[in-house]
């Protein structure tokens, strides 16, 4: 798990110049202050985590359980509730705000989001299969996977076989993205490289669990 984490929103991609005047492709993440709604501990809940909310929402538009949850914590209602799994939650308290400044000293971060959905795709696009030959008897099977199983034994296709199906739209994590800039005043975090998901996607940012490259 992570020691630091925060919830943000993907704005898009751009490029900046570093000190050596080299162009760096970066993804812009908008990180609004995360308000802590609940602190979960190992002794009480079996694991340690922070439940946070971002944005602002009219309390009258919430369900009664949701409104009661925010009222019990005495925290202003937000757009959504997100749980951040952390190794240690000591030092955090309900009502505290976590800002992008908490990641300013991190050299690399891991970013998790739901990737773009691509719809139904074949094995060549989905898994990178080479396809079958273009001549010598191949008839209308050029993009098909070919044989997918055995003969009489075991008379079935093993689970996990790479086949055509829905591509994308799944939880994806990109590891070790370099933090280029953390702007607390504008609530922006710039990381080098691409981040899963479309513009406006909710992203989970945490310190790199495998360390920087």
Image (spheres, rainbow, N blue to C red):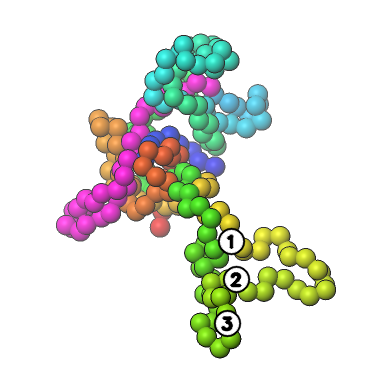
- Labels 2 & 1 near each other (Cβ < 8 A): yes
Disc assigned to residue 145: 2
Whether residue 114 is visible, yes or no, is yes
- Quadrant in the rendering for residue 8: top left
Labels 3 and 1: the sequence-earlier one: 3
Residue 54 placement, left or right of 63: left
Q: Give the quadrant of the C terminus.
A: bottom left
Give residue 42's position: percent from left, percent from top.
63, 29
Element class at badge 2: loop
* Image quadrant in which the N terminus is located: top right
Q: Is residue 95 above or below residue 180?
A: above
Q: From the image, give the main secondary structure of the stretch colored magenta.
A: strand
Is disc 1 surrounded by few (<14), some (14 to 19) or many (20+) residues within 10 Å? some
Viewer-side residue, 206 vs 198: 198
Is disc 3 in contact with disc 1, using a CB cutoff of under 8 Å? no
Q: Dot 3 corresponds to which residue?
A: 138
Which residues are drawn in magenta? 11-38
Q: Residues within 10 Å of mark 2 (few under 14, many from 20)?
A: some
Q: Residue at x 45, y 39 (%)?
A: 204
Q: Earlier in the sequence, mark 3 or mark 2?
A: 3
Residue 44 percent coordinates (x, y): 65, 24
The question of residue 17 being in magenta is answered with yes
Q: Is residue 110 visible?
A: no
Q: Which mark is residue 164?
A: 1
């Amino acid at each position: 798990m992570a020691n630091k984490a925060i919830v943000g929103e993907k704005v898009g991609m751009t490029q900046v110049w570093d000190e050596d005047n080299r162009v760096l492709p970066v993804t812009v993440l908008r990180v609004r202050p995360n308000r802590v709604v609940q602190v979960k501990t190992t002794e009480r809940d079996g694991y340690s985590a922070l439940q946070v909310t971002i944005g602002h929402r009219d309390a009258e538009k919430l369900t009664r359980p949701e409104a009661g949850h925010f009222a019990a914590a005495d925290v202003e209602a937000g757009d959504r509730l997100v749980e951040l799994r952390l190794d240690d939650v000591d030092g955090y308290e309900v009502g505290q705000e976590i800002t992008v400044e908490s990641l300013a000293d991190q050299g690399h971060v891991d970013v998790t989001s739901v990737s773009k959905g691509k719809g139904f795709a074949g094995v060549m696009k989905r898994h990178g299969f080479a396809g079958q030959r273009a001549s010598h008897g191949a008839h209308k099977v050029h993009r098909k996977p070919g044989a997918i199983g055995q003969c009489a034994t075991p008379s079935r296709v093993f689970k996990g076989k790479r086949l055509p199906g829905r591509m994308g739209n799944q939880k994806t994590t990109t590891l070790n993205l370099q933090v280029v800039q953390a702007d607390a005043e504008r609530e922006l975090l710039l990381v080098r490289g691409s981040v899963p998901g479309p513009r406006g996607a909710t992203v989970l940012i945490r310190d790199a669990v495998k360390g920087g490259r």
